[in-house]
């Protein structure tokens, strides 16, 4: 339990020696986030960006903080800033995160654009496939939704949320046996969880 506190001490000491190191500010932000101190997280991410204006990981992280606060427009702005840097090593993360914002806003076409880009960059990105499934479901394109949920569990066989989404889709389309299997997988990989209980409720109806 003391890991973040210990890390915090070390990073603070290091910052006294290297106050202009953007990576130290980023590490501090991460540590404050682990302690739930989001104002300090935000401050150090902004310091990291001030010191390194093309710091895409910091822009992406800031977007994530704003998304968590329900500030979608700010989140979108920071995710796009992350993507402006052609040397950004993790563009799939910003694309997936943009997909999440647009999913929340029910802007499914925009979500699809970014999520398809995320899986193009990283073809085994299970979370992005799961989000793509939701976006295609929102558009009423159920075959594509199913394909993407299936990709999600193919690349992450422990992905309870994707099994649940797939199960619900199969349940609604009347594929009872496949739905039963999918709900069973939820309970198998996440026993005792809330989504396992939801899966169990669906199983009772089958």
Image (spheres, rainbow, N blue to C red):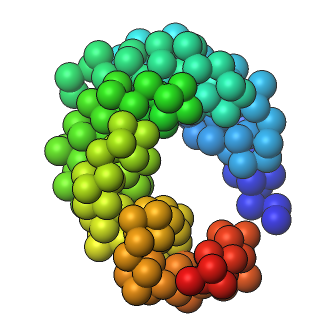
Q: Position of residue 105 (x, y in %)?
A: 54, 25
Q: Residue at x 82, y 65 (%)?
A: 1
Residue 172 in sight here: yes
- Residue positioned most to the front: 174
Pick the residue in front: 10 or 47: 47
Tell me: residue 160, above or below residue 48. Answer: below
- Count of numbered marks: 0
Out of 79 and 155, give the one closest to the viewer: 155
Query: Which residue is located at x 17 percent, y 44 percent?
Result: 120
* Quarter placement of the C terminus: bottom right
Mark yes or no: residue 48 visible. no
Front one among 40 and 101: 101
What residue do we see at 48% from left, 34% from top? 103
> Compared to 179, does 31 lie above or below?
above
| Residue 52 percent location from the top left of the image | 43, 17
Q: Is residue 51 above or below residue 182?
A: above
Horizontal side, residue 79 vs residue 73: left or right: left
Residue closer to the observer: 55 or 81:
81
Residue 168 placement (x, y as % from top left): 50, 65
> Which picture quadrant has residue 73?
top right
Task: Judge from the rendering whether residue 135 lies leftward or rightward of residue 106; answer left or right.
Answer: left
Q: Residue at x 39, y 16 (%)?
A: 81
Compared to residue 136, the image places residue 172 above or below, namely below
Residue 114: percent from left, percent from top: 30, 32
């Amino acid at each position: 339990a003391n890991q973040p506190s210990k890390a915090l001490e070390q990073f603070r000491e290091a910052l006294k020696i290297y106050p202009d190191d953007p990576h130290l500010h980023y590490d501090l932000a991460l540590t404050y986030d682990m302690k739930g101190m989001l104002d300090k997280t935000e401050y150090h991410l902004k310091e990291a960006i001030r010191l390194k204006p093309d710091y895409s990981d910091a822009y992406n992280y800031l977007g994530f903080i704003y998304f968590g606060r329900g500030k979608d427009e700010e989140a979108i702005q920071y995710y796009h800033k992350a993507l402006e840097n052609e040397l950004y090593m993790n563009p799939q993360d910003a694309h997936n995160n943009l997909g999440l914002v647009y999913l929340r806003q029910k802007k499914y076409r925009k979500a699809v654009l970014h999520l398809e880009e995320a899986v193009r960059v990283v073809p085994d990105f299970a979370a992005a496939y799961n989000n793509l499934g939701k976006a295609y479901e929102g558009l009423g394109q159920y075959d594509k939704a199913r394909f993407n949920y299936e990709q999600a569990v193919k690349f992450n066989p422990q992905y309870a949320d994707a099994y649940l989404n797939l199960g619900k889709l199969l349940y609604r389309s009347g594929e009872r046996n496949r739905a039963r299997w999918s709900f069973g997988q939820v309970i198998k990989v996440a026993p005792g969880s809330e989504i396992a209980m939801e899966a169990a409720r669906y199983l009772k109806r089958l």
